[in-house]
Image (cartoon, rainbow, N blue to C red):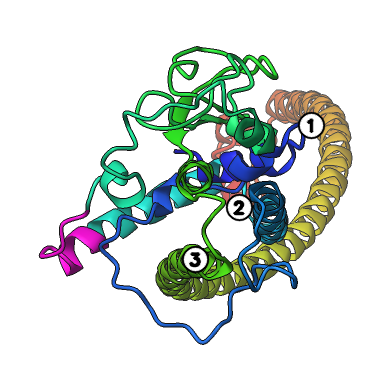
Amino acid sequence: MACGREERSHCSDSETESDQYGECIDESFEYTGSQSPIKSPIKSPVKTPAHSESPRPAAQKQNVGFNKWLQNKEDDTLSEHSSLCSTRLNTAESDLDPNDFDRMADQIAKRVKKELSLTMPEVKAKPFQERYVPQNYAAKSPSPSSSSSSNLRPASHYCPQCSTLMVPPTSSPMLLIPCGHTVCQRCSKVTSCSVCNNNVTSVASNIMIQQIIVDFEEIKPSNNIHSYKQEACEDQQEEYNSLILRCEVLESESDDIEEKMAEISRKIGKEKTQIKMIENQETNIQRQIEELRQNLVALQQHKVEYEENCHALDAMREQEVMKLKMTAETASELRAKAQKGVSEKAEVKTVNLNLTDQEDVDRDRWRVGNNEWCKCGQCKPMDCALESCCEQTQ
């Protein structure tokens, strides 16, 4: 049904008077007659001429007075619906997206229909022709000869496309959605509006302007002002009942929205609690990361120090290795020299021994040759030469 888009497009279009009548009609809140009349202390805002308390003697004067009353009624209806539409439009544009507003309006309309069918099943709604159109009205048609009455009809009572008087059942006024223009039933079977050339997505019966046209055609100029007041009060009462019903539906929808908001608020509280816990964990992890980073920096510093110590010890070891090598070479040289000295000493000793032995032999030989005996007088000269003398063994 697209109520939100329908209301916005209707309220923004002010080309003809018929468009103004159709702009604020919400088809989802059509009065079906099943709602029992509500007695309201509100007086009818319909303005009536002060000089029409008594019937006029001339039909032309009565027609002029009726036309003025009807024009005042239409002006009052237009002002009320324009203010209502402007309020809805501002609320919808400031708070809701157009698609969300349309979806909500569809839900409200379905709920209203469901509540009406559940709460009042015993009341059977009458068709529109039985409620608003007389039984013999369908056979009537506007007569071309009645120039005085046709001249008094507003332009909004005629179809802007075929100029046909929009009366049921064949030429009922139909509201084109979403542009909001009103045409007759035969001209509504199109895909685009003939006034603004906008695409037509759906059509709906314009109940308010249809009721105004039927009342206009049904009421005769000879009727007195009391019948005008009575019908105006009935229309106002019907509109009041429709507004009350819409208010109740909107209040119910408001309660549902408040419950959903409360549930959403609880969920938001839970989510915020989780977010707080995650933030605390994040803070702890960040602190641990900072501590680990500091430990890593300290370990890296210790590593650098140990590496420097290792390099220094490696240099010291190289120096000691070089010293050891030099010491080993020196010791080897000294050992070679010592070995060489020992060999030379042994050779000298051997030479000395050889020289001594030779002297002894020579001496013994000399003694033998000279027949000398040992001092003991027992050794032979040969024994002395062979070193077996007692003198040498002592």
Tag 1 residue = 342
Which amino acid does the dot numbered 3 rest on? Ser
Of residues 66 and 37, which is closer to you in this image?
A: 66
Q: Is residue 340 left or right of residue 202?
A: right
Of callouts 1 and 3, which one flags the residue occurring earlier in the amino acid sequence? 3
| Element type at mark 1 | helix
Residue visible at 79% across and 23% down in the picture: 347
Question: Label 3 to label 2, Cα distance in Å?
Answer: 200 Å
Residue visible at 73% across and 36% down in the picture: 13
Of callouts 1 and 2, which one flags the residue occurring earlier in the amino acid sequence? 1
Q: Residues within 10 Å of mark 3 (few under 14, many from 20)?
A: few
| Element type at mark 2 | loop
Q: How many marks?
A: 3
Of residues 322 and 392, which is closer to you in this image?
A: 322
Which region shows up in magenta? 115-125
Residue 85 percent location from the top left of the image: 66, 54
Residue 16 percent location from the top left of the image: 73, 33
Q: Nearer the viewer, mark 3 or mark 2?
A: 3
Tag 3 residue = 227
Question: Label 1 to label 3, Cα distance in Å?
Answer: 165 Å
Residue 202 percent location from the top left of the image: 45, 26
Question: Is-magenta flag for residue 121?
Answer: yes
